[in-house]
């Protein structure tokens, strides 16, 4: 009896342990199935013939199926885009039993191509596999490859030189057009340091600009897309030099930190030579024009001997005022030349009026007041590169509109005309005229001083007063 009881208890214990084992097995199977169904990677089981035994949810989504039944109806084998890939997969599995990271093209339910990385094992006629969809990555890689190919095609066929260099100013890439720029023949070195291919002055300029730009990088919200345009003198392979215009900007890493320099170089040697020739031609024309103006001035003075040297003196004072005001050189030259011929219109005034010793009548005065307009009419069609005609026209205008011939007010009159007006008044008051004796230079300065900002430009008057009172300016003697 005791033995039977023990045998029964042992049997019950074994049954209980078996039930517990089955329960744990079912739980383990459920966890495994949940893990597979919720995995991001596609997981499948199939037999060697290609029949689908299991697809997880990721695999169903990858192929566009709603249910396992729908996926199983077609099988794995028909999902290959070409049978060559299927034959290769089966051959490797049958020979080695496993496959790792093999790139395969499949088609979805809608016959759309997808590219996956396939890893699988073959055991007892069952293929267990995992698939990762890399279609988007492949498309991005292909787009990048095409983009890189296009950019390289553009770079290698552009007439400008496209290049990159590291932060030590050593070239890391130079497009083939460098050969034309520097006269490099086949087999000669191309990738060099910047120091080897530009003049010392240009190299020092580049170092200075690089320091400036790196300093900018420390400023908050620095411009990440900033570029600079430089002119550099480059050294050709035969030792001669040329000029290039270079647009440069930083290459940056993901955090925006400069890691290199991108540049586009254009040969401007011919343009620089043309600029030099143009400047030479302009200077020659300027000298010829100055000679012509001087000759015209002498003709005017022969008709008005009482004002001999007047235009030259006005020109000299006006030029000096312009220089003291810090005006640009071309504007100073224009004022100087306009001063020399500002009374050219007096050629149309009868000489007896110009030399009349007494007071002028209203009619005679109208002839005198017409000389700025006459001067403008003489000069306006000469097509001078400077506003000489306009300055001559306006040199008797006044700030308050009381001048002639147009009655212009302050802002309507050219600065050059305002300066010549002051020089004209000072010289005229301090010089002898047929209708009155000369007054002192102090009287002339008092006239412009009391009317500065009213009739005459305030800044130009202050400069003129300083020239005479503090810097010892004097008119040169007539005939000197």
Image (spheres, rainbow, N blue to C red):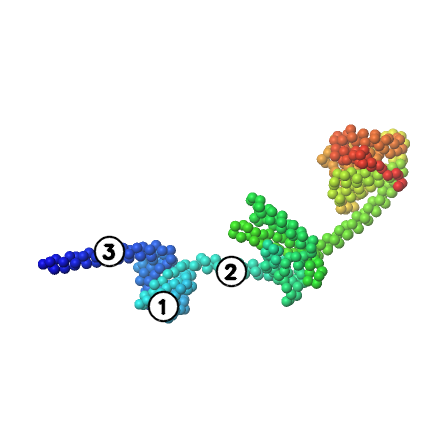
Residue 478 shown left or right of residue 21 in the figure: right
For the C terminus, give its image quadrant: top right
Residue that extends furthest to the top in the rendered view of this protein: 450
Residue shown at the point (49%, 60%) measured from the top left: 142
Residue 201 position, x and y percent, is: 69, 53
- Which residue position is annotated with label 1? 97
- Residue 99: percent from the left, percent from the top? 39, 65
Which sits earlier in the primary sequence, circle 2 or circle 1?
1
Between 20 and 171, the residue placed more toward the observer is 20
Point out the image quarter for the N terminus. Answer: bottom left
**Furthest-front residue in this view:** 2
Residue at the spot 30% in from the left edge and 55% down from the top edge:
31
Please provide percent x and percent y for residue 82: 41, 66
Q: Foreground: 362 or 339? A: 339
Residue 426 visible somewhere in the drawing: yes
Q: Residue at x 40, y 64 (%)?
A: 100
Hey, which quadrant is residue 29 in on the image?
bottom left
Q: CA distance from mark 2 to mark 1?
A: 35 Å
Q: Residues within 10 Å of mark 3 (few under 14, many from 20)?
A: few
Q: Earlier in the sequence, mark 3 or mark 2?
A: 3
State the residue in front, 212 or 46.
Answer: 212
- Residue 386 is situated, as x and y percent measured from the top left of the image, at 76, 44
Any part of residue 163 in sight: no
For residue 23, the mark is 3
For numbered disc 2, what is the local secondary structure?
A: helix
Is the Cβ of the residue at disc 2 closer than 8 Å to that at disc 1? no
| Residue shown at 84% from the left, 40% from the top | 312
């Amino acid at each position: 009896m005791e033995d039977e009881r023990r045998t029964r208890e042992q049997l019950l214990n074994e049954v209980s342990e078996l039930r517990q084992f089955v329960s744990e097995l079912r739980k383990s199977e459920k966890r495994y199935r949940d893990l597979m169904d919720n995995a991001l990677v596609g997981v499948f089981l199939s037999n060697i013939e290609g029949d689908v035994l299991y697809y997880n949810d990721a695999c169903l989504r990858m192929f566009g199926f709603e249910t396992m039944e729908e996926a199983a109806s077609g099988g794995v084998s028909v999902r290959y885009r070409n049978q060559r890939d299927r034959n290769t997969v089966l051959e490797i599995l049958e020979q080695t039993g496993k496959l790792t990271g093999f790139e395969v093209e499949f088609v979805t339910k809608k016959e759309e191509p997808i590219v996956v990385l396939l890893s699988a094992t073959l055991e007892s006629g069952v293929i267990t596999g995992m698939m990762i969809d890399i279609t988007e990555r492949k498309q991005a890689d292909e787009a990048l490859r095409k983009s890189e190919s296009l950019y390289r095609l553009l770079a290698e066929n552009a007439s400008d030189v496209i290049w990159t260099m590291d932060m030590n100013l050593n070239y890391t890439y130079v497009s083939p057009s460098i050969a034309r720029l520097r006269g490099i023949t086949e087999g000669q070195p191309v990738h060099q340091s910047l120091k080897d291919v530009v003049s010392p002055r240009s190299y020092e300029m580049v170092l200075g600009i690089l320091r400036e730009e790196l300093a900018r990088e420390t400023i908050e919200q620095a411009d990440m897309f900033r570029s600079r345009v430089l002119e550099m003198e480059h050294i050709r392979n035969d030792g001669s030099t040329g000029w290039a215009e270079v647009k440069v900007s930083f290459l940056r890493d993901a955090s925006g930190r400069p890691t290199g320099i991108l540049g586009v170089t254009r040969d401007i040697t011919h343009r620089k030579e043309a600029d030099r020739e143009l400047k030479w031609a302009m200077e020659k024309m300027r000298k010829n024009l100055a000679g012509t103006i001087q000759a015209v001035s002498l003709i005017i003075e022969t008709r008005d001997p009482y004002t001999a040297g007047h235009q030259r003196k006005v020109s000299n004072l006006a030029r000096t005022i312009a220089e003291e005001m810090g005006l640009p050189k071309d504007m100073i030259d224009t004022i100087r030349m306009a001063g020399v011929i500002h009374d050219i219109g007096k050629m149309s005034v009868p000489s007896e009026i110009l030399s009349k010793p007494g007071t002028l009548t209203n009619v005679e005065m109208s002839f005198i007041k017409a000389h700025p307009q006459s001067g403008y009419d003489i000069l306006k069609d000469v097509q001078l590169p400077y506003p000489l005609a306009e300055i001559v026209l306006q040199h008797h205008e006044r700030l308050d509109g009381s001048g002639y011939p147009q009655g212009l007010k302050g802002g309507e009159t050219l600065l050059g005309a305002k300066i010549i007006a002051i020089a004209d008044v000072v010289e005229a008051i301090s010089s002898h005229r047929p209708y009155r004796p000369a007054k002192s230079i102090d009287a002339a300065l008092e006239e412009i001083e009391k009317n500065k900002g009213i009739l005459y430009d305030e800044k130009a008057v202050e400069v003129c007063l300083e020239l005479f009172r503090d810097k010892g300016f004097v008119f040169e003697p007539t005939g000197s």
